[in-house]
Amino acid sequence: MPRLFIALPVPEEIADELVTLQAGVPDARWVPAENFHVTLCFAGEVQGGPMRDLEEELSDIAGPPFPVAVAGVEQFSSGKQPRALVALVAKNDRLDWLQQKVSTVARNCGIELERRKFRPHVTLARFSQGAETGHHIAQFMASHSTFQAGPWVADHFALYSSRNGLYREEAAYDLAF
């Protein structure tokens, strides 16, 4: 069963800039550039009627294109265990609005969502349990703390499926009035 998520794709020119960050941390599983995205809503395992409803209902979201920029890096962790290295997306009211609309649509389609604070980011690397990173993460953070990329114009968002670590765009939705 596919795992679904709704996200903003990262354009190739921004992905090329993000790839330059992907080095210097042992045991990091670097995310391929073609998988870079900004998750708006993680729906999880969905199929059948709820998936068709979601595909259809997302098309009702209308809003203008808006600029998106990357500003800085961060480490996500569970306790002392690093989980991911990410590039942060700069605060953006239009992005927050879109994330809320997408989440409302998913809930209205009967999809249970985690209740997490929205922290827009692009995942650069993931870590396995027990990964050896030593001082390398601190060095990564210090070296890239002022990293910036973009802005780019988010003119659409997409529904993606994930199977065995491969992402596939199931449907795209233009942002336009």
Image (cartoon, rainbow, N blue to C red):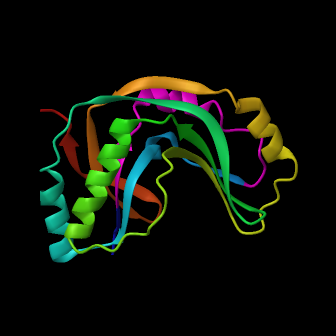
Residue 42 in sight here: yes
Residue, x 76% and y 38% (percent of image)? 140
Q: Tell me residue 162's x, y (percent).
A: 39, 62
Instruction: Specify the quadrant of the image occupied by residue 108.
Output: bottom left
Front position in the image: 123 or 69: 69
Instruction: Locate residue 153 relative to residue 146 in the image: left or right.
Output: left
Instruction: Locate residue 125 relative to residue 151 in the image: left or right.
Output: right
Say which quadrant the C terminus sits in. top left
Does 12 appear in magenta?
yes
Residue, x 19% and y 73% (percent of image)? 50
Front position in the image: 32 or 107: 107
Among all residues in the image, which is located at the extreme right? 135
Residue 169 in sight here: no
Residue, x 22% and y 61% (percent of image)? 105
Q: Tell me residue 167's x, y (percent).
A: 39, 55
Q: Tell me residue 115's x, y (percent).
A: 44, 67
Instruction: Locate residue 140 relative to residue 135 in the image: left or right.
Output: left
Does 151 appear in magenta?
no
Q: Tell me residue 145's x, y (percent).
A: 70, 32
Q: Which residues are magenta?
A: 5-27
Number of disc labels: 0
Q: Using the image, determine if residue 60 lies above or below residue 1.
A: above
Instruction: Locate residue 142 relative to residue 3 in the image: left or right.
Output: right
Front position in the image: 82 or 30: 82
